[in-house]
Amino acid sequence: MSGMTGPVGELGARLDELERIVKSLEDDPAMTLDEALRLYETARRLSQACHADLDRARLRIVEIDSVLDAEDGGDAR
């Protein structure tokens, strides 16, 4: 997803970083507890940001559908 910009690109970048963190947590037996906790905190923040992005997208979809349904007299779909 490297070349993407805007909200979709940001979401993709966050998901890529989450994947990298999970892999690090799973694959690095020498990781210290402090490092694991720091990565966990970062992952939680990224996860919250992804959920917020998806919630905003869902709301936007509802808005778009409402507008288009109203324009079509409610017969679309």
Image (cartoon, rainbow, N blue to C red):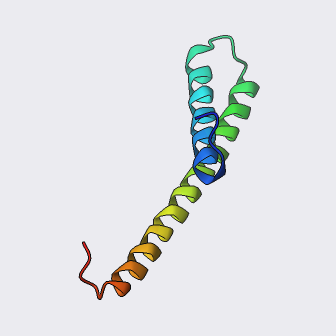
The vertical placement of 44 against 68, above or below, is: above
The vertical placement of 33 against 16, above or below, is: above
Name which quarter of the figure residue 41 lies in. top right
Give the residue drawn at x 73%, y 19%. Answer: 32
Give the camera-side residue of 61 and 71. 71
Tell me residue 58's x, y (percent): 46, 64
Tell me residue 51's x, y (percent): 54, 54
Give the residue drawn at x 62%, y 21%. Answer: 24
The vertical placement of 67 against 47, above or below, is: below
Tell me residue 62's x, y (percent): 42, 73
Q: How many marks?
A: 0
State which quarter of the image contains the N terminus: top right
Q: Residue furthest top?
A: 30
| 68 left or right, relative to 52 | left
Give the residue drawn at x 28%, y 85%. Answer: 74
Give the camera-side residue of 2 and 33. 2
Name which quarter of the figure residue 71 lies in. bottom left
Tell me residue 77's x, y (percent): 24, 72
Give the residue drawn at x 71%, y 24%. Answer: 33
